[in-house]
Amino acid sequence: MQVIQQVAFIVCLAVAAFFISRRVRRIAGNIQLGRPLSRKDRPSERLKKMLLLAFGQQKMFDKPLIGLMHFIIYAGFLLINIEVLEIVIDGIFGTHRVFAPFLGSFYGVVIGFFEFLAIGVIITCVIFLIRRNVLKIERFHKPEMKGWPQMDGNLILTIEIVLMLAILTMNAADSLLQLRGTDHYAVVGAFTFSQYLMPLMAGLDTGALIGIERVGWWLHILGIMAFALYVTYSKHLHIFLAFPNAYFSNMEPFGKFENMSTVTREVKLAMGLMEDDGADEGEAKFGAKDVTDLTWKNLMDAYSCTECGRCTEQCPANITGKKLSPRKVMMDTRDRVEEVGNYLSQGKTLAEALEMGDALYSDRYISKEELMACNTCNACVEACPVSIDPLNIIVELRRHIAMEETGTPASWNNMFANIENNMAPWKFSPSDRFNWVEELNK
């Protein structure tokens, strides 16, 4: 019987590893569809930013109570997985609580700490479910959160509750089996919190207790495996991608726009600031229409989005009733690159994949109305807890509209012409700029 369980466990582990690794390769390939971008400068500053934002959850504590609850779930997820290591070893080698002989009496303290985190995760998840579904916090019920995104949020919280209950049930049954001297269950003592579940099972016979302990054990480990695969399709991928995303984030001051190299070269040549080296930069393309026109960092941003809605909550355009939602920009970018990646996995060429479906800039994904509503204030970038930059995507798409389609409003075109001719948004010659001073002297 034990051998059968070991074989079943190894098969489950291998199947989970296969599907998870395949999914990770797909996501990595999709991110690499983006244009090259160097983000290797200032490594120490980047490391500090990653530790503060991703590991320390710094921005989450802008709202202290919510930040603390989020940290409990985050710490619980990370630390309780240490116990998963023991479960995996037990599953492969047929042992039971393999770490207990090495840790001695400290083993009970460690498991007690894990149970403390499990209780914290359960309480916090219940509160978060209430906030989403009873209190109906507004940012969780914006138009882009209808359907799957809303279900995703509820599903992940429910799964975490089930996984934590499985641990506590397993430990309670285990403690009773220890007291009865059942073979295979080493005596390590009752645990801090699960001991309060023991009276509920005290009247069961040993066979039933072994069944409950095994169901809890299998439910927890299979749940962890399923969860690990599920998060690659979910917004909860930010649990892993928040770290590289924060490290490779933009270190320049907010509001500083990057010049387009093609335009910069032409301007410098026209002004005699550089010699024409005859370099062929290929067909000039301005801005972005689809995901392959964006950088790999833009696409990593999309996969890192937590869908928390803090960006949309702070967006002045959205607050005043405009259609723009920075969160939707990131969700649409992720959906589009997933679509292109799916076509590529079916054997299509990149050109064919891009032709199938609608481009990122389209009424199906990000529309002109949404893009034109942005005032580039950077509030969305400032609000993001994992340093995502929706504005960069918006600006690139608007550059496409302005320079490839000449589709900007007439008032904008007049402003562009004034900047080009007068070096200011107004229709006055630079030589007349200080005429108003003469009026003061009259």
Image (cartoon, rainbow, N blue to C red):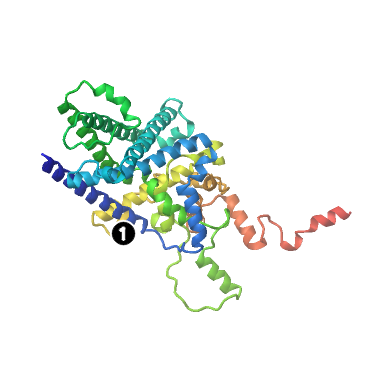
Front-lying residue, 331 or 247: 247
At x 67% / y 61%, what residue is drawn? Answer: 422
Front-lying residue, 136 or 72: 72
Residue 370: percent from the left, percent from the top?
Answer: 49, 44
Residue 336: percent from the left, percent from the top?
Answer: 36, 49
Amino acid found under the numbered disc labelled 1: Leu
Front-lying residue, 169 or 108: 108
At x 45% / y 35%, what residue is drawn? Answer: 69
Residue identifier under label 1:
350
At x 45% / y 40%, what residue is drawn? Answer: 71
- Left or right, 203 with reference to 370: left
Compared with 243, 423 (above or below) is below
Quadrant of the image for the C terminus? bottom right
Compared with 234, 45 (above or below) is below
Residue at the limit of the structure toward the front, as seen here: 105
Specify the quadrant of the image occupied by residue 72.
top left
At x 27% / y 36%, what residue is drawn? Answer: 188
